[in-house]
Image (tube, helix red, strand yellow):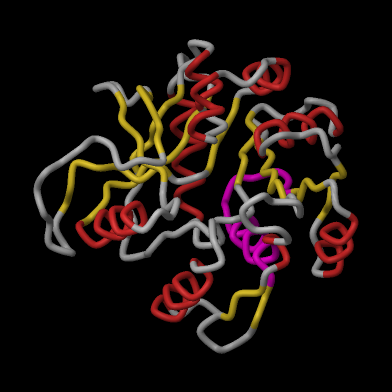
């Protein structure tokens, strides 16, 4: 099955304008843009036929082409990364069996997250979409709770059935747990990692649907699938000692740089 990775990169972010071009310093002090680091993460994934950056902004296109990325121009009408992936797939002729949305704000995404995600979607013929989830340790959970206490949007959490089909995703910390956890202790909370693999039919349908009330309230694009009764497979992945964080706010930049330094990422 042919696999396409699309990296949606939008300049006009409401929360963080110009986010794809924000520079992050690695362990050696070299600064590279967020979109470049996301592209490098995509290029490290095995079994992928093509990687493209999808944008509606000339600044991002010029920058991405300068470091060697293939760019697909999409319209300003795209409301989220999934719609941009659908448009990119359409521009390329709908010729890929699986389309991966590697969001441009997650440069710490390990290659095996995407590889296991694609394998999970191939194996579960009942699923229309697949997305990775990572069991939170106490350190991660406490970070999410601290963000919420301070009015910040941190990570997204996921709850799912016994067969790993999603029930809900939220920017609140769900499920609720009254316990306190040590930094290295496993918790019942799963962090939703912002990567998706879609079957072409589901992606084409998505682009034609209106936004539902839950998607509007949470600001989470994947809820449009659940509101339409489509199955999302949650693939549990292992961190293997790696830390993971998405760049949602300017305050996340030093957090991600510290994680990169700790992991020795250039």
Indicate left or right for 177 with 49 as reference: left
Is 63 magenta? The answer is: no
Q: What residue is shown at x 61% (from left), y 53% (from top)?
A: 15
Q: What residue is shown at x 11% (from left), y 54% (from top)?
A: 180
Instruction: Report x, y in % for residue 217.
Output: 50, 29
Indicate left or right for 113 with 44 as reference: left
> Which picture quadrant has residue 201?
top right
Q: Which residues are magenta?
A: 33-51
**Foreground residue among 63 and 91:** 63
**Quadrant (top left, top right, bottom left, bottom right) of the C terminus:** bottom right
**Foreground residue among 69 and 148:** 148
Instruction: Report x, y in % for residue 7.
Output: 69, 48
Q: Where 143 sits versus 86, above or below?
A: below
Considering every residue shown, the one lying at the far bottom of the view is 28
Indicate left or right for 231 with 200 as reference: left
Is 35 magenta? The answer is: yes
> Which picture quadrant has residue 26?
bottom right
Considering every residue shown, the one lying at the far top of the view is 229
> Which picture quadrant has residue 216?
top right
Indicate left or right for 152 with 12 as reference: left
**Foreground residue among 147 and 51:** 147
Instruction: Report x, y in % for residue 87.
Output: 79, 31
Q: Where 110 sits versus 176, above or below?
A: below
Q: What residue is shown at x 52% (from left), y 36% (from top)?
A: 118
Q: What residue is shown at x 67% (from left), y 49% (from top)?
A: 14
**Quadrant (top left, top right, bottom left, bottom right) of the N terminus:** top right
Instruction: Report x, y in % for residue 244.
Output: 41, 60
**Foreground residue among 230 and 113:** 230
């Amino acid at each position: 099955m042919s696999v396409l990775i699309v990296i949606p990169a939008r300049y006009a972010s409401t929360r963080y304008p110009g986010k794809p071009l924000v520079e992050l310093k690695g362990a050696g002090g070299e600064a590279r843009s967020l979109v470049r680091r996301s592209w490098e993460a995509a290029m490290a994934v095995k079994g992928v036929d093509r990687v493209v950056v999808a944008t509606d902004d000339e600044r991002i296109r010029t920058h991405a082409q300068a470091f060697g990325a293939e760019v697909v121009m999409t319209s300003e009408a795209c409301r989220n990364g999934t719609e941009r992936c659908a448009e990119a797939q359409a521009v390329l002729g709908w010729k890929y069996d699986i389309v991966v949305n590697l969001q441009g704000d997650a440069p710490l995404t390990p290659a095996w997250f995407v590889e296991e995600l694609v394998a999970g979607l191939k194996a579960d013929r009942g699923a229309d979409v697949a997305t990775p989830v990572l069991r939170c340790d106490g350190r991660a959970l406490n970070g999410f709770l601290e963000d919420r206490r301070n009015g910040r949007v941190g990570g997204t959490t996921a709850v799912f059935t016994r067969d790993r089909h999603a029930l809900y995703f939220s920017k609140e910390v769900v499920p609720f747990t009254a316990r306190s956890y040590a930094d290295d202790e496993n918790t019942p909370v799963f962090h939703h990692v912002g990567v998706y693999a879609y079957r072409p039919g589901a992606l084409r349908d998505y682009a034609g649907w209106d936004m539902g009330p839950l998607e509007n309230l949470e600001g989470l694009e994947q809820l449009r699938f659940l509101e339409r009764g489509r199955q999302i497979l949650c693939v549990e992945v292992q961190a293997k000692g790696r830390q993971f964080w998405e760049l949602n706010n300017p305050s996340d930049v030093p957090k991600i740089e510290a994680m990169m330094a700790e992991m020795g990422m250039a």
